[in-house]
Image: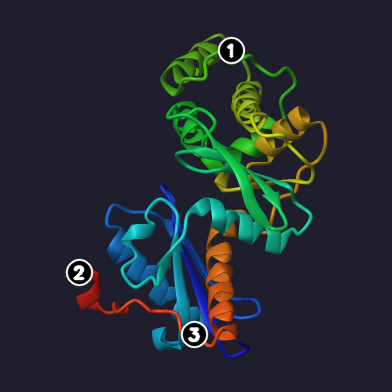
Amino acid sequence: MKNQYFAGVDIGSTMTKVVIMNQRVLAEVIGPTGPEHRKLANRVMEEALTRASLSFDDITYVVATGYGRINVPFADKQITEISCHARGVSHLLPGVRTVIDIGGQDSKAIKLKDGRAVDFVMNDKCAAGTGRFLEVTAEGLGVKLEDMGRLSLEAKNRAEIGSTCTVFAAQEVVSKLSEGVPLPDIIAGLHEAIASRIYGMARRLKIEREVALTGGGAKNIGLVRALEAKFGYPVLVPPEPLLTGAIGAALLGKDMVKKAEEKGETLPRSERRLTEASIFE
C-alpha cells in the first residue's frame, strides 16, 4: 500500500479539516466552515492536493466525517466522528483510553478499547461546555479568543461564574467587569465553569487514563489546566488537536482498503469526482 494515498475530510460546525496520507500525513488544511459545505469541501480538497503535489485521481479512497460529512459529494464513505476521533487519537497517542473532544457546537467524551470507541457521551443542546461558549464570552469581554488561555493563567483570584447558560453567563461577565473584577480572574472563572460542565459529562463514562483532549478547546491552555485540575492528573493533547478526526477518517479508509485487498475485493468508489459539475449540480 506504499503508493496508495488516503484522504480524510472532517467538516465540523465551525472548522473544516482535510488530511492526505500514505504512511504519514503528506498535507493538511484547516479553515473555517462556511454555509456552503459542498463548495468548501471542493476548495479545501483542492488545496490539500496542491500541497501534497497530487491529483485527485491519485487518491485511493476518501472518507468524510463530522457535522457536514454528507455534504462531501466526492467521498467514497461517510463515517461518524466518534469512530474517526477514536481511530485518529489511537494512532497519534496509543495509550489513550478516554478522549474529550471540545468542539465548536458540542463536546463529547469517548471511551477507547484496543483503539476503538466502545462508549461515548455528548453534552446537551446548551452551548456551555463548547467552543461557542468561549467565543461568545470573548466577544463580550473584547478579547481575542486565542488570547483567552494565556490571560486566564494570570488570574490571582478566580471569579465565580454561576451560570452555565451562554446568555446569562455573558450578563454575569458584564456585571463582574463593572464591579472591577480583573479580566484574568473572569476568564479563569469561565474556564472553570466550562471545565466543570465537561467533567460532569465525562464522568457519565468511567474515565480511564490516559485522557486526551481534542478539538479547538484543546488549544486553550487555560481550559486544559482547568480540566487537569478536575481530573487530578495531566492530560495529553495531540500536536494539532483539530486534525484527529480527519486523520482517523483517512486511516479508516486505509484500513477498509487493506481488508478488501486481503479478500481479493475492490471497494466501490464514489462516481462523483472533484469537478465543478459534481459539486454544484
Which one is earlier in the sequence, the residue at label 2 or at label 3?
Answer: 3
Horizontal placement of 40 versus 180: left or right? left
Residue 243 location (% of width, % of height):
57, 59
Quadrant of residue 148 in the image?
top right
Query: Which residue does the numbered mark 1 point to in the structure image?
Result: 180
Amino acid under label 1? Answer: Gly
Q: How many marks?
A: 3
Residue 183 location (% of width, % of height):
60, 24
Q: Tag on residue 280?
A: 2
Is residue 240 shown to the viewer in this render?
Answer: no
Tag 2 and tag 1, C-beta contact below 8 Å? no
Is residue 182 shown to the viewer in this render?
Answer: yes
Residue 119 location (% of width, % of height):
61, 43
Q: Residue furthest top?
A: 179
Figure check: 45 above or below 4: above
Amino acid under label 3? Answer: Glu
